[in-house]
Structures are given as structure tokens and as C-alpha cells.
Image: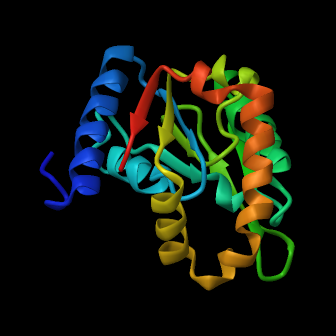
Amino acid sequence: MHSRSSDPFGQALTRAAADIIEAIRAVEASNPVVLFDGRAGAGKTTLSRMVAANWPVAGRPQLIALDSLYPGWDGLDAGAERALHDILRPHARGLLSTWRRWDWELGTEAEAHAVTPALGVILEGCGALNPASARLADVRVWVESPTPSRKRRALERDGEGFRPHWDRWAAQEDRHIQRHAPQELATMTVALP
């Protein structure tokens, strides 16, 4: 895997992705489950996409972003619970399952997506890592980054539409971290600039 750029963030992502891929290889599972958790803008989405693009196991991983499950700006806990109920638990039992994408524009559930137990799962988003999900995952990654860097990246990615919701979302992140201590449940911690 080559560096996606010469900047410190890109170099750190490349190193972290390589380490995570090695951890997945070490699991020796045909359908590993990898969780990425961290605050908004930390780098979870970019890192999980890099890992998916270089997946070390036969077949393609099923990459699912919690952003697609959160039922709106106040839905961190509900999105994490939906992921547990609709994706992780059925996958662990070897069952085919479906989850429904949340349509942020319409404020309602949209199309269904199937999850096959024969393939690995990458679930990324704040709330992905909690005591219940940790028991069902092979590799658990906590991604951290300084608040100014996170906010800049989040606003660059999501646009100004995120700005009025930043504090509201951060309060939900705080509750998740206080309640579940995801950084302590992680098998790996990635610090990005």
C-alpha cells in the first residue's frame, strides 16, 4: 500500500490502514467484523475505505457507515442500536439480514441493503463500538484526532450544513464515550493529526 499523499494526515492514514490490515489477517477468519469508532471528522470514513480497498480476506467486505443508519441529528444511540440489531447480531449468527438506509432529506427510512454472513463487515461511525458490539467484532479500532482538525475535516466533507449541528452531535459523542468507553474496548487506537 502506498502513501495516499505526502502530508502528515495521509501518511498517518496509510500507516494505520496497513496496521489494521495486518490485524485482520491475524484473525484468520473468512468473514471478519471490523468496527471503527471515534468522533466526527476523526478520519474513520477515510480509514475504513482504505482498509476496504485493500481487504486481506477473500471476497469484498460489506462497508457500512453509521451515517446511513442514524435517524437524524439526534440519532447516534438509535443508529448504533440499529447496527447491532440489524447487522452485527445476525451476521454473528450466520444469518442473512437487511438494514434500511436513513434518508436525511426526507427524514425517513429508505431502501433496504442486504448483509450476507459469508462476507466480512466493516462498520464505521461514532457509536459503532460499545460493550455489545465489541463481543461481536474481531478488530475494534478507536480513531482520535484533535478537535480543530476534526471540525475542519468534518465541515470540508459535509459542508456548512453540519456547522449548526456540531455541538449537538458532540454532546451525543460525549455521552457515548462516557457510557461505553469505546477507546477502552478497542483492540487498536489510531491517532491522526
Q: Quadrant of the N terminus?
A: top left
Report whether residue 27 is seen.
yes
Q: Is residue 38 above or below residue 56?
A: below
For the point 28% across and 33% down, which residue is it? 56
Report whether residue 57 is seen.
no
On screen, residue 59 versus residue 67, left or right, reads left
The image quarter in which residue 106 lies? bottom right
For the point 59% across and 32% down, which residue is it? 117
On screen, residue 189 versus residue 98, left or right, reads left
Q: Is residue 114 above or below residue 133?
A: below
The image quarter in which residue 107 lies? bottom right
Position in image of residue 94 (x %, y %) = 65, 25
Camera-side residue of 119 and 160? 160
Camera-side residue of 31 and 34? 34
Position in image of residue 135 (x %, y %) = 66, 16
On screen, residue 23 versus residue 163, left or right, reads left
Q: Is residue 43 above or below residue 32?
A: below
